[in-house]
Image (spheres, rainbow, N blue to C red):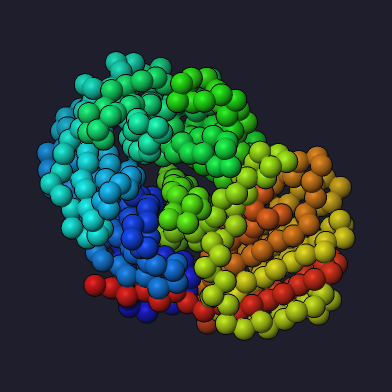
Amino acid sequence: MKKRKYAARFHLMPPQGWLNDPNGLCQLNGVHHIFFQYAPEDPRGGQKYWGHFETRDFIRYTFTGLFLKPDCPEDRDGVYSGSAYVEDGEMYLYYTGNVKHRGDYDYIYSGREGNTLLVTSRDGRQASQKECLLKNQDYPENLSNHVRDPKVFKEGETYYMVLGARTRSDEGCVMLCASKDKRNWHFDHFIRKADFGYMWECPDLFELSGRQYLSLSPQGLAATEFKYQNVYQSGYFTTTRDLLSSGDGLGEFYEWDYGFDFYAPQTYEDERGRRLLIGWMGVPDVPYDHDPTIGEGWQHMLTLPRELIVDERTGRVLQTPARELLSLRKEQIYNGSSSEFLEPVSLPEGYELLLEGFADTDFELLFDGGFRVSYDAQSRVCSFLFLDESLGYGRRERKIRLLSQERVCAMRIFVDTCCMEFYINGGAYVFTTKSFREPEKKHSLSVKGKMEHMEVFELGCFDVSQE
């Protein structure tokens, strides 16, 4: 891929154009397949295709090009998001075909089709002929035209599909469908929670350590000081009963990521039995859609792949970067306490920072002279603030308040050319943001507050080839 000054070192980015939702995540015969929403012609978006990366180790990747194009009547206005189900050496790839009829329509309650289509593939490169499985008339009558993002899985002898939807009374919900053959689907029931947004996107129902979780991206939640601070959110519900048999078993909702740049995550189970999550490092409809990468002909990235485990004490899901990413470490450049970082210290183009042994007192981290992460021990509030607006490009401040019995005890931080990921307390809280320092300037870090143990590793780059 052509060298660009803002190019990420160890985050996947489009060769050109626009990238958004990860799609069709799966592993087949040792190869992880990462499809994604892709508008190659324009870094500000446009007609949506599916692009495709493949990897065996999350370090070396191949971009194989366009996998799906909007080339049939049922997806003529965009190949939208979907998922993969693997069985008998084949990927079954379900997705939403977007159609917008010409005329005076609002495209919410009229004028739009959200068709559910299927293709199969054995290699992620060649797709079978498209099959249209469900159309608007197959969905319940109380739904608007916004039905999309199928995710398919199997339980016992039955295949299930969850789709995100918006009702005609502007309530978000999940539509659960069932099938015995992966092609003929019937509506089973809705999964709902009252007064929780007008649209639910990207649903993902999965089991982890014997517990059931529903991940989704709700739209229309009112922001508070410490919750729902983005225009749209992404998180997961715990459950109080089996959602396959009851639609009213949703428990607490936890946000996956509190940062400026995170949306539309998808999970999958790999061949080791791990549950992995990848998200889009972006959010739709934000006021800061003028990243400087647009001038280089591209926009947005995917997050690092994250392993999910359950905190058995709380039932919450912890996220930690996939263990394969340890091989990115080139050299340990610091190992000690935080005392040597009282003044700004220059650091490599990409690095990993480990902090442990916090004294349960206030602390402050200052990155690149203009992005401050601070913690108030009394209020248990962690604040992420762009002091220098030229770094944030419209991003300003986000806050996290830890639960009453918690305090910050560890942080693992990945700093790339133009983005950062923070994993707090083993991934109980995660924060992802883009940050655009001038590339000719070195990364820098200063620390206020006592941390007994601090390590810094220089990180290498992903090896990305293109076919």
Quadrant of the image containing the C terminus: bottom left
Give the image location of residue 119, x and y in percent. 20, 46
Q: Quadrant of residue 334?
A: bottom right
Please give the name of the residue rendered at 62% of the width and 84% of the height, measured from the top-left corner. 331
Q: Is residue 376 left or right of residue 233?
A: right
Q: Quadrant of residue 442?
A: bottom right
- Nearest the camera: 178 or 380? 178
Give the image location of residue 308, x and y in percent. 56, 50
Please give the name of the residue rendered at 38% of the width and 26% of the height, measured from the top-left corner. 176
- Nearest the camera: 36 or 239? 239
Quadrant of the image containing the N terminus: bottom left
Count of numbered circles in the view: 0
Q: Is residue 436 visible?
A: no
Please give the name of the residue rendered at 30% of the width and 67% of the height, measured from the top-left corner. 63
Give the image location of residue 225, x and y in percent. 68, 39
Q: Is residue 333 left or right of residue 173?
A: right
Please give the name of the residue rendered at 73% of the width and 41% of the height, measured from the top-left corner. 313
Q: Is residue 262 left or right of residue 24?
A: right
Q: Is residue 462 visible?
A: yes
Give the image location of residue 349, x and y in percent. 55, 79
Q: Quadrant of residue 270?
A: bottom left
In the figure, 204 relative to 453: above or below?
above
In the figure, 106 relative to 368: above or below?
above
In the figure, 301 relative to 241: above or below?
below
